[in-house]
Image (spheres, rainbow, N blue to C red):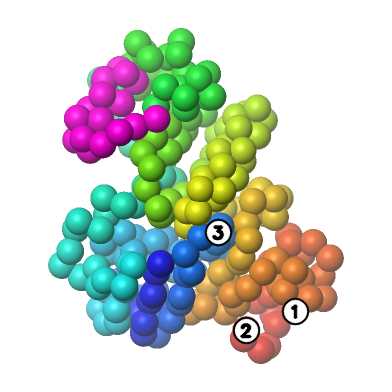
Amino acid sequence: MIQIENLHKKFGKNQVLSALDLTIEKGGIFAVLGPNGSGKTTLIKSILGMVVPNKGNILVDGQPVEHKWKYRQDIQYLPQIANFPGNLRVKELIRMIKDLRQRPSEEEYLIDLFGLQPFLDKKLATLSGGTKQKVNIVLTFMYNSPLLILDEPTTGLDPASLINLKKLIAKEKGRGKTILITSHIMQFVAEVADSVIYLLEGTIYFKGSIAQLQEKTQQTNLEHAIAAIATTPAHA
């Protein structure tokens, strides 16, 4: 699904990604983890074409993404911060996205799932952070795309909405989709992810299953394993 080869990215003198190699197979849920400043966001934005690497190649479905844009039609992206036009109503934003995409959508099911019906006529500027995140989720999942990238998807969600999000992610996995997730909530990662990709100082320090990570670090839960991985000398 995604092949990354020798990826480098600098911002000024700051080397954010350094000779990064990564293969993400088709199907399954991959958690991209690492401390702040490890390169997670830069990696994701490079895949999306929002950041141009200084060196290296990114291929999606075998096709290089450099100077391309059509491949993004098959990616759904949930940004960490939903910066919506505050003067638009929720239903107007959804209609605008539908007009832009011109593809079959599944927004009615998602609106019901996250209880957004009472908010459709409200302006986005008046919504709470949690409600904005629900709108963010609806916009991300309303199209049937093979690749989903979810950046901190649990932000601001109440317990019921979090349960629904996990069910939704499991449903999309069951449809054979590839899902990349970043999160600082290790319990959430442990519940949904098949594999962990751990970044440290702009390189892949570990890639494997949660069980493999726990075995490598000699820890019995994911939170402790993540805390220990940076001090483990050998890369995996």
Which residue shows up at 62% across the image and 57% down it?
193
State the image quarter where residue 139 is shown: top left
Work out whether residue 144 or residue 185 is closer to the camera in this orientation and state it. Answer: 144
Work out whether residue 113 or residue 89 is closer to the camera in this orientation and state it. Answer: 113
Q: Is residue 147 left or right of residue 71?
A: right
Which residue shows up at 30% across the image and 33% down it?
104
Q: Is residue 166 visible?
A: yes
**Position in image of residue 144 (x %, y %):** 38, 42
Q: CA distance from mark 2 to mark 1?
A: 9 Å
Which residue shows up at 46% across the image and 10% down it?
118
Which residue shows up at 73% across the image and 60% down it?
223
Label 2: few (<14), some (14–19) or many (≥20) C-alpha neighbours in 10 Å: few
Residue pointed to by mark 3? 28
On residue 216, the disc is 1
Earlier-in-chain disc, 2 versus 1: 1
Is residue 89 shown in magenta?
yes
On residue 236, the disc is 2
With respect to residue 175, does 71 lie above or below? below
**Position in image of residue 234 (x %, y %):** 66, 89
Mark 1 residue type:
Lys
Mark 2 residue type:
Ala
Earlier-in-chain disc, 2 versus 3: 3
Is residue 185 shown in magenta?
no
Q: Mark 2 falls on what kind of element?
A: loop
Mark 3 residue type:
Gly
With respect to residue 77, does 236 lie above or below? below
Q: Is residue 123 left or right of residue 227?
A: left
Q: Mark 3 falls on what kind of element?
A: strand
**Position in image of residue 33 (x %, y %):** 56, 63
